[in-house]
Amino acid sequence: MPDPKSLDDVTTPALVLDRTRMARNIARLSGRAEALGVTLRPHLKTAKSVEVASCLTGGTPGPITVSTLAEAERFHAAGYDDILYAVGIAPQKLDRAAALRRAGCDIAVILDSAVQARAAADAGVPAMIEIDSDGHRGGLVPDDPALVEIGRILAPGGRLRGVMTHAGESYGAEGRAAHADFAETERRAVVDAAERLRAAGLDCPVVSVGSTPTAHAARDLAGVTELRAGVYMFFDLVMAGIGVCGIDDIALSVLTTVIGHQPAKGWTMVDAGWMAMSRDRGTAAQRVDQGYGVVCDLDGRPLGELIVTGANQEHGIVALRPGGTGPLPDLPVGTRLRILPNHACATAAQHDRYHVIAPGEPGLAVWPRFGGW
Amino acid sequence: MPDPKSLDDVTTPALVLDRTRMARNIARLSGRAEALGVTLRPHLKTAKSVEVASCLTGGTPGPITVSTLAEAERFHAAGYDDILYAVGIAPQKLDRAAALRRAGCDIAVILDSAVQARAAADAGVPAMIEIDSDGHRGGLVPDDPALVEIGRILAPGGRLRGVMTHAGESYGAEGRAAHADFAETERRAVVDAAERLRAAGLDCPVVSVGSTPTAHAARDLAGVTELRAGVYMFFDLVMAGIGVCGIDDIALSVLTTVIGHQPAKGWTMVDAGWMAMSRDRGTAAQRVDQGYGVVCDLDGRPLGELIVTGANQEHGIVALRPGGTGPLPDLPVGTRLRILPNHACATAAQHDRYHVIAPGEPGLAVWPRFGGW
């Protein structure tokens, strides 16, 4: 099929990226990092696109974070040579990391055990020690005796790159004040850990924090050198639900077509099911449950109280939210709609390309995105 | 990277297919269809693989069901020319269906409104009328006056292919007796609808039912001509939870590697998060909530009470199920595990290939799978 010229030509379901909104979101966090005096190391696990990466780093490759070695390899091929692979390293994966280093990529891994540190040291791959600041998943608490033990294993040859943490629990807290508290918890944990390593005579050049909520709320990052965040360029309903952004900052949506109705139930059926939206129900635990997404018109304006209340593989059910009122808009078979996602990372992962628009400007670009490991 | 020779060489996370179990599952439903005297039209929305399709249809292309036009195009290119596209048709998609027909593929669509029927008739594409047997999503109830109206729009030129239904609500019922009742509800709804069309002087050659639970439980399919089912070749924890299969019939799993521990919490961290497992939590509403999946050893044997209790994008948390007891097995960093999925359709969709094994036989095959629309 020929490349589409506008959203009218795009086969549904399809992923749409509003690059005007994305540019605003990128500028917002870049400005904060500058004001806080830290290096921004964007996490590309959500974007998985060379074109989006280029927008994030101002057109010139800069430091990035990735969640898979496939991302590291793709972005290195596109000119990125300062990469943090931010998932606890499996020893079996060090060969691929070492191969990237031999090819000129300064990739570092993360770890939280002596066994991983010995494997990384043997492979000649530098590492950051993961610090647990909020009980979210991996990492050592700053006063764990293993911290200095690991630091000593890595130190020879300068393979101790630093310490890092991620306050994943901040996604469950609402409001700027709560996120600022999590940011301070992140900061204190890594600064403590860095001081312990330095007190043991070890170098700890990089002190890294970050999550999208804390990155937007941190009051002060004294002692921190870099900031990581992933979903901030797109945002989503989960981020809007905890007050990090507004609904009209969300840059990703799924284009869909009306394929039927069940008038007695108030249902409009669309061709975006969970295959297009993902099974993510991240707003289910929030104050406002957005179902599988907020339904908008083709210009991206929410249609009253309509959400996707149910999803099968290739079917979505559009209806008023529970308790919602107001007349149902007339949405005949064939009507095009756009749906804002709960979780941009999960929804984008269901698609192999972005359909990129800038409202008010003609035309449409198609940017590929990749997946896999 | 060279092709892996065994699971030991496969980068994690990765999708594993046990073809011995798959062959048993395929034989089971083929035998039932034969005994019930109906044509089996496998749904390939779960498999999305030419190699798996070939196993389903005994090596020679046969009738199939698909959920996207991308599947129709791929399977037609592989020799399949009798295809039902079983998602309510968007009029904008009829061009692609018509192009497939011109290329020699007998593709039919499904619909439940006069506006869709007129569009299909105009495009020269035959259609099945979707019947609502259980209130699950789309379709007309058999006594809806629109049924005959739609039949009359399609009839000229023989474009009324028949009637079809899918008892999606059967997934929420447990046990063979309940599924047999749903099968009878499916049967009665389409047979009723076919009789109404025939009483109006219209041909209705195909009378089609199916869902994996009802297909395995139907006692009698009098008046039905064909049976559809999708997940039966793989099965999953949702199907095991409602008694359609056993845990040891599940042919799909996700290979993963241990990447860390939080001993105080009883957590083992693995590199299979929701990107590898999907966000599907289909067992959450069942009697036994399996989290994000049941944890097995490398040979596919469940490890006591271990499940994936939490998932981030590339991290899974393995722990005892709530209330579970028993010693935690020793799972050092680097240990390989396999995780049985809640929902095979959703988990498979996160991967671009199957790593195919037959326990007891050496070697490993890699079969590609595709996605998109």
Image (cartoon, coloured by chain):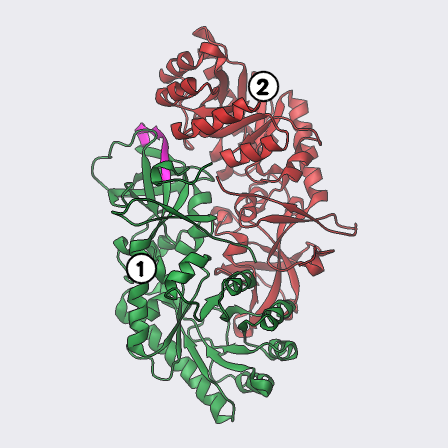
Chain colours: A red, B green
B157 to A192, vertically: above or below = below
Q: What chain is tagged by disc 2?
A: A
Residue B85 % position (x, y): 52, 69
Tell me the crowding category of disc 2: few under 14, some 14 to 19, or many 20 or more residues within 10 angstroms, Cα based.
some
Tell me the crowding category of disc 1: few under 14, some 14 to 19, or many 20 or more residues within 10 angstroms, Cα based.
some
Report the residue that reaches farthest toward the left.
B326
A187 or B20: nearer the viewer: B20
Name the residue: 38% across, 23% down.
A116
Q: Is A322 left, or right, of B277 in this rendering?
A: right
Find numbered disc 1 in the image and state the secondary structure of the residue it sits on.
Answer: helix
Q: Tell me the chief SS of the magenta region.
A: strand
Mark 1 — residue? B23
**Residue A184 in view of the camera:** no
Query: Mark 1 and mark 2: span between their CA atoms?
Result: 56 Å
Same subunit, tags 1 and 2: no
Q: What chain is tagged by disc 1?
A: B
A273 or A342: nearer the viewer: A273
A15 to A213, vertically: above or below = below
Q: Which residues are magenta?
A: B256-265
Q: Report if the CB atoms under discs 1 and 2 are less than 8 Å apart.
A: no
Q: Is B226 left, or right, of A15 in this rendering?
A: left
Q: Amino acid at mark 1?
A: Ala
Q: Which mark is residue B130?
A: none
A339 to A29, vertically: above or below = below
**Residue A313 in view of the camera:** yes
Find numbered disc 2 in the image and state the secondary structure of the residue it sits on.
Answer: loop
Q: Amino acid at mark 2?
A: Thr
Q: Quadrant of residue A183?
A: top right
Residue B144 % position (x, y): 51, 83
Mark 2 — residue? A225
Q: How many marks?
A: 2
Residue A274 % position (x, y): 50, 56
